[in-house]
Image (spheres, rainbow, N blue to C red):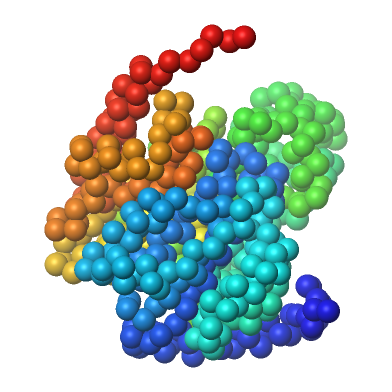
């Protein structure tokens, strides 16, 4: 019988008690990197499976946390990395090689890779909890639980239960606070933080409430052309839809509401696979918001990354300019670091106000605040509209961490730049979404061969080059990610364009050699 049933008051009390160990452990390791400790990495995507299914090769996204293997550069650090399916040894060797100065045999001895041999859409944390023998192996591998903690992609009740079952603290947000990261919750945070965000309504749940919100927005803003309808738990822009008012000709509010309600099935969904029936069903399940679409000819999409550390202090980490795509430009495709100099410190300051508000409420760990920025009407600077908080690790986490671990440099919040140890400022262009049908069939070893032959890889002496990730998705989905690190953005973008050009050329050559039998 389980002493602390999932979700019970006993489990919650035990979780809060275990979490009390985290500040002392964090402080001890920060003061002395020679302290022996164990990090359990559980890169579970514990999110709504209906939204996850929109992402090609999503089960390989667990690999994005492989950057944590670079923590093995500290000689007393041990890592237990658990995945749904086994990761190719070629990929593991690739990351260990990036350590530089640490013998691979030494880091290998301090790394334990475990997997569930399960490719289903069930979250990884649940897979582990359903396997008592695997859970026991993890406990044995942890050893001294007083010097161990767990990190994850996002925290849910599954990660809380797993932390309690293992008896180690979770360096992530308490799942009881996860509503703060929903589209409705973050609007309340923005309001309390006193920062600019689009006019709109939150905590909506059905088509009638959507129609009421759209109607009221139109009354307040008669010239408004379109509005955004968002699922509370959508991510990467895939849970958004646009409503166009040009299909509404009624001026009387009562008649206009009727037309709006009848027109909801015509929403323009950002996800190609979405439709009104599924969207409205999810909206009733998880709720959502309606808000004005921020218009502008020269819109930008910066984001601010912050952390609340285990002693409750809000700390700035970085700023990025997001690269967006999709039918209406709301889907995250990649990012550049740092954000443009003309506004990066403004974005950082607004992000810190959000971070400090979250810290007051007990949030913990890393998160990002995304903005839509448009030029001010007087042409002097930008208005930065906060649009969401990603209360988890996100698409900007692994590229920035990769840069930090590879260079041993640091972020300067006074300038918003990152400096290597030699004082050189560093930039990057990163993407998770480089994809081609012709990439299918390539193995990680093939990718590494191509990178070495064409000198695409990261060079430690110059601290420039390309670091690959999501390599496990290459053969089946023709998809991979890259972080292209340079001394300036122009150089970083050139590295990305060059690597992309080379990969397409090599893949095209291989496809010309493919011979398939005729269809029966």
The residue sitting at 62% across, 9% down in the picture is 520
Instruction: Find residue 129 and report its image quarter.
Output: bottom right
Say which of 213 and 11 sits in front.
Answer: 11
Q: Is residue 144 visible?
A: yes
The residue that appears at 40% across and 39% down in the rendered structure is: 443
Q: Nearer the viewer, residue 497 or 328?
A: 497
The image shows residue 363 at horizontal and vertical percentages of 58, 74
As displayed, is residue 441 above or below residue 11? above
| Nearer-the-camera pick, 65 or 84 | 84
Q: Identify which residue is drawn at 63% across, 82% down.
A: 167
State the image quarter where residue 128 is shown. bottom right
Position of residue 34 measured from the top left corner of the image (x, y, whole percent): 33, 85
Q: Answer whether residue 317 is visible to the viewer in this image.
A: no
Examine the image and state in which quarter residue 47 appears.
bottom right
Residue 173 screen position, x and y as percent: 60, 71
Work out which quarter of the rendered image holds the N terminus and state it: bottom right
Q: Is residue 237 above or below residue 22?
A: above
Relative to 94, 185 lies left or right: right
Taking the image as shown, residue 70 lies to the left or right of residue 65, namely left
Q: Nearer the viewer, residue 476 or 181?
A: 476
The number of callouts visible is: 0
Q: How far across and how far down the image is residue 433, in percent?
A: 45, 39
Q: Which residue is found at the position 48% from the left and 52% from the top? A: 87
């Amino acid at each position: 019988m389980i002493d602390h049933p999932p979700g019970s008051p006993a489990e919650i009390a035990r979780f809060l008690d275990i979490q009390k160990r985290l500040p002392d452990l964090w402080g001890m390791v920060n003061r002395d990197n020679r302290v022996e400790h164990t990090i359990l990495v559980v890169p579970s995507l514990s999110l709504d499976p209906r939204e996850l299914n929109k992402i090609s090769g999503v089960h390989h996204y667990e690999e994005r946390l492989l950057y944590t293997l670079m923590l093995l550069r500290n000689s007393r650090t041990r890592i237990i990395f658990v995945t749904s399916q086994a990761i190719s040894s070629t990929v593991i060797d690739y990351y260990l090689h990036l350590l530089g100065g640490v013998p691979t045999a030494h880091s290998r001895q301090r790394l334990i890779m475990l997997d569930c041999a399960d490719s289903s859409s069930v979250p990884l944390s649940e897979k582990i909890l359903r396997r008592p023998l695997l859970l026991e192996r993890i406990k044995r591998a942890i050893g001294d639980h007083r010097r161990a903690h767990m990190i994850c992609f996002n925290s849910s009740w599954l990660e809380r239960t797993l932390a309690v079952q293992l008896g180690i603290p979770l360096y992530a947000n308490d799942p009881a606070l996860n509503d703060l990261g929903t589209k409705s919750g973050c609007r309340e945070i923005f309001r309390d933080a006193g920062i600019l965000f689009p006019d709109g309504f939150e905590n909506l749940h059905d088509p009638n409430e959507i129609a009421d919100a759209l109607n009221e927005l139109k009354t307040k803003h008669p010239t408004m052309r379109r509005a955004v309808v968002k699922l509370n738990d959508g991510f990467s822009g895939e849970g958004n839809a646009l409503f166009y008012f040009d299909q509404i000709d009624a001026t009387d509010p009562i008649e206009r509401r009727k037309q709006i309600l009848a027109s909801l099935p015509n929403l323009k969904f950002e996800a190609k696979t979405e439709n009104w029936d599924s969207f409205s069903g999810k909206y009733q399940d998880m709720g959502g918001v309606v808000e004005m679409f921020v218009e502008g000819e020269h819109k930008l999409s910066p984001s601010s990354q912050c952390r609340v550390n285990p002693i409750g202090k809000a700390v700035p980490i970085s700023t990025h300019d997001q690269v967006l795509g999709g039918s209406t430009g709301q889907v995250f495709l990649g990012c550049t670091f740092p954000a443009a100099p003309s506004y990066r410190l403004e974005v950082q300051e607004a992000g810190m106000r959000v971070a400090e508000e979250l810290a007051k409420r007990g949030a913990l760990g890393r998160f990002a605040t995304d903005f839509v920025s448009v030029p001010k009407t007087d042409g002097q600077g930008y208005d930065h509209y906060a649009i969401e908080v990603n209360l988890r690790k996100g698409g900007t986490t692994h590229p920035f961490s990769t840069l930090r671990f590879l260079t041993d440099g640091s972020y300067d919040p006074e300038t918003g730049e990152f400096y290597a140890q030699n004082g050189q400022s560093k930039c990057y262009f990163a993407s998770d979404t480089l994809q081609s049908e012709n990439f299918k069939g390539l193995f990680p070893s093939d990718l590494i061969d191509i990178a070495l032959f064409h000198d695409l890889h990261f060079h430690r002496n110059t601290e420039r080059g390309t670091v690959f990730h999501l390599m496990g998705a290459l053969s089946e989905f023709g998809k991979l990610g890259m972080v292209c690190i340079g001394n300036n953005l122009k150089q970083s973008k050139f590295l990305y364009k060059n690597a992309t050009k080379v990969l397409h050329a090599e893949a095209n050559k291989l496809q010309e050699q493919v011979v398939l039998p005729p269809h029966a």
